[in-house]
Amino acid sequence: MEPIKLLCKFLFELGHLRRIKHEGWRLALVETPDSVAEHSLRAAQIAYVLACLEGYPDPNKAAAALVFHDMHEARTNDSHKLASRYVTVDKARAAHDQAEPLDKIGQSILELWNEVEAEASPLGRILRDADRLECAFTAKELIETGHPATQDWIDNIKLHTDSAKAMLSTLREMTSTDWWKGLKQLPR
């Protein structure tokens, strides 16, 4: 199959992430959780910011890694931590099978995916923190819209970097709507 067609198939597959729901929120009685794609976007944005704050020399790489970090879920679906105790998913195989036909581009994507899985490196710690911190931001929003059980995602988060810990501490003190307050008074 020609390379462009393979890449198009892969991009259609990534589009499927818009339809896969972030299942962990259902444990907290959230009926319409965010999609995996929505989670991945903000996680990538947080990764960029954390990489800058932590002095990582390539924040673009951090953001790119989080863009692809849940790509395997297009094939495996999202499993929350409780389900993962009983159901084994071969995330690495799924990611490899997705990327392998894409030659050099696929190898590059798989390297990014592996960075997220490897918490041992400085970048791996930033990426894991970004992924977890995104869930904390979402939990805060869900608490404020009537889902108090999501507080668990804030109270039990394990973070590595000082910047992520500072963000978590700050988000605990804020409301998710603080960002727009006062903007109406800005001069036009």
Image: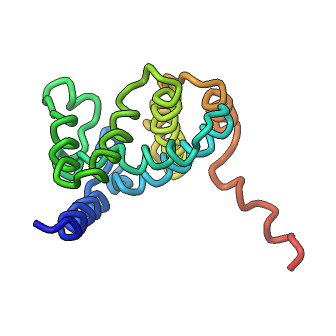
| Picture colour scheme | rainbow
**Rendered-image quadrant of the C terminus:** bottom right
**Rendered-image quadrant of the N terminus:** bottom left
Q: Which residue reaches farthest bottom?
A: 188
Question: Residue at left 18%, top 47%?
Answer: 100
Q: Which residue reaches farthest left?
A: 1
- Whole-percent x and y of residue 24? 32, 40
Residue 142 in sight in this render: no
- Total marks drawn? 0
Residue 167 in sight in this render: yes
Relative horizontal placement of residue 178, taking residue 150 as reference (left or right): right
Question: Residue at left 62%, top 27%?
Answer: 165
Q: Is residue 126 above or below residue 106?
A: above
Question: Residue at left 15%, top 68%?
Answer: 2
- Whole-percent x and y of residue 111? 34, 39
In this rendered view, identify the residue nearer to me: 164 or 179: 164
The image quarter in which residue 7 lies: bottom left
Q: Is residue 1 above or below residue 134?
A: below
In this rendered view, identify the residue nearer to me: 2 or 138: 2
